[in-house]
Image (cartoon, helix red, strand yellow):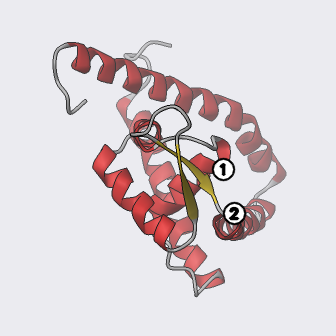
Amino acid sequence: MTDAEFAPEDAWSLTDVITRMRRVLRSGIREELPWESLPMAQVELLQRLADEPGLGVSELAERQNLARNTVSNLVQQMVATGLLERKDHETDRRAVILNLTAAGEDRLRAWQDANERRVRHALSALPEGERDAVDRALPALRSLVARMESDDRASKARLRAQGRPDA
């Protein structure tokens, strides 16, 4: 299927569904965990560092598609609240290595468990065919995200090659 064969409304529908799901998960977490006040950007950094422990600030910013100074500020906040530990890099004195603390792991696990319960509950209310369709769509959605991340990295590399430091 080419870009022309994939109707724009299909692309928008997918974007809309993802946006709405993120929103309902984000708002619902406050119902299940009323004490939770962690901003979504910090949750996403916890998720990334759980998947890829030991990243530095620059690597984390690149992976999250955020400005380095934004990630640096988030990391400072998260270190101050005990969610992350920052260690000096063994060979590069300008760099640091970031890892979750036990408290960071606990907060992330609480988020993940609450969201998993909500999604499982919603899935259980769907007809079996729709549950199966969601399950079958997951590999394709993972591939789609990987493709988009790859395209984004390539685009940024082209911009950097053109002398655009903000890429």
- Where 65 falls versus 155 (above or below)? below
Seen at 76% across and 42% down, the residue is 135
User: Foreground: 162 or 16?
Assistant: 162
Q: Is residue 20 visible?
A: yes
Q: Residue furthest left?
A: 163
Percent position of residue 62, x then y? 41, 36
User: Foreground: 42 or 72?
Assistant: 72
- Where 41 falls versus 160 (above or below)? below
Q: Which mark is residue 70?
A: none
User: Foreground: 98 or 32?
Assistant: 98
SS at mark 1 in the image: helix
SS at mark 2 in the image: helix
Q: Give how far apart the Cα atoms at labels 1 and 2 are.
A: 8 Å
Circle 2: residue type: Glu
Q: Residue 41 occupies which quadrant of the picture?
A: bottom left
Image quadrant holding the C terminus, namely: top left
Seen at 66% across and 43% down, the residue is 51
Percent position of residue 56, x then y? 48, 41
Pointer 1 or 2: first along the chain: 1
For label 2, the residue is: 105
Q: Residue furthest bottom?
A: 34
Q: Which mark is residue 50?
A: 1
Percent position of residue 90, x then y? 56, 37
